[in-house]
Image: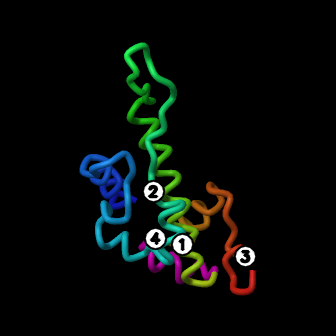
Amino acid sequence: MRQLVNAVERALVLCAGREIGVEDLPDSISRLQGDGEAVERRGQARIEEEGKDRNGVAGLRPLREEREELLQSFERDYLARLLRSTGGRVGQAALRAGITPRSLYDKLRRHGLRKEQFRPGR
């Protein structure tokens, strides 16, 4: 998890535009992209405008809130890609992610994901 947080924070600081793309992520993460379309559609972080003040400047939420939302979205997408790549096999997915199966189950529950969603034929 610490590596994930560091990678996202680094990408937030170094990305040239308003979106984090696969090219902004370290190779260790960008290799997990699966089909490029899914990453482009779901894996890019957007800084959302919440209206403009009288000077036309976008009002942003506090960094802590933006970071938490970004991390939650990234974690959910990562878990979905990971389970898709293992055919829903939690043991293999946990091994690839470097976490225990129990921890992976907790994360799946927190994100409303079920291993059955990622089994072949679904």
Task: Name the residue at 62% across, 84% down.
Answer: 87
Q: x%, y% of residue 78?
A: 50, 66
Of residues 3 and 78, which is closer to you in this image?
78
Between marks 4 and 1, how big is the CA–CA gap? 16 Å
Residue 80 sits above or below residue 35 on the image: above
Tell me which amino acid carries mark 2.
Gln
Where does the magenta region start and end?
Answer: 88-98
Residue under label 4, please give it: 99
| Kind of residue sitting beneath label 3 | Glu
Could you tell which of marks 2 and 4 lies nearer the N-terminus? 2
Q: Nearer the viewer, residue 46 or 81?
A: 46
Q: Which residue is mark 1?
A: 81
Of badges 3 and 1, the one in the foreground is 1
**In this figure, which residue is indicated by the disc labeled 2?**
44
> Residue at horizontal 43%, vertical 75%?
32
Nearer mark to the viewer, of 4 and 1: 1
Q: Name the amino acid type tagged 4.
A: Ile
- Report how far apart the C-alphas of labels 3 and 1 lie in the structure: 14 Å
Q: Position of residue 85 (x, y in %)?
A: 54, 81
Name which of mark 4 and mark 3 comes first in the sequence. 4
Q: Amino acid at mark 1?
A: Arg
**Of labels 2 and 4, the one closer to you:** 2
| Residue labelled with disc 3 | 116
**Does residue 21 lie above or below 29 as drawn?**
above
Image quarter of the C terminus: bottom right
Query: Would you say the residues marked 4 and 3 are in contact, meaning their CB atoms lie under 8 Å apart?
Result: no
Counting every numbered tag in the picture gives 4
Q: Residues within 10 Å of mark 2 (few under 14, many from 20)?
A: some
* Earlier residue among tags 2 and 3: 2
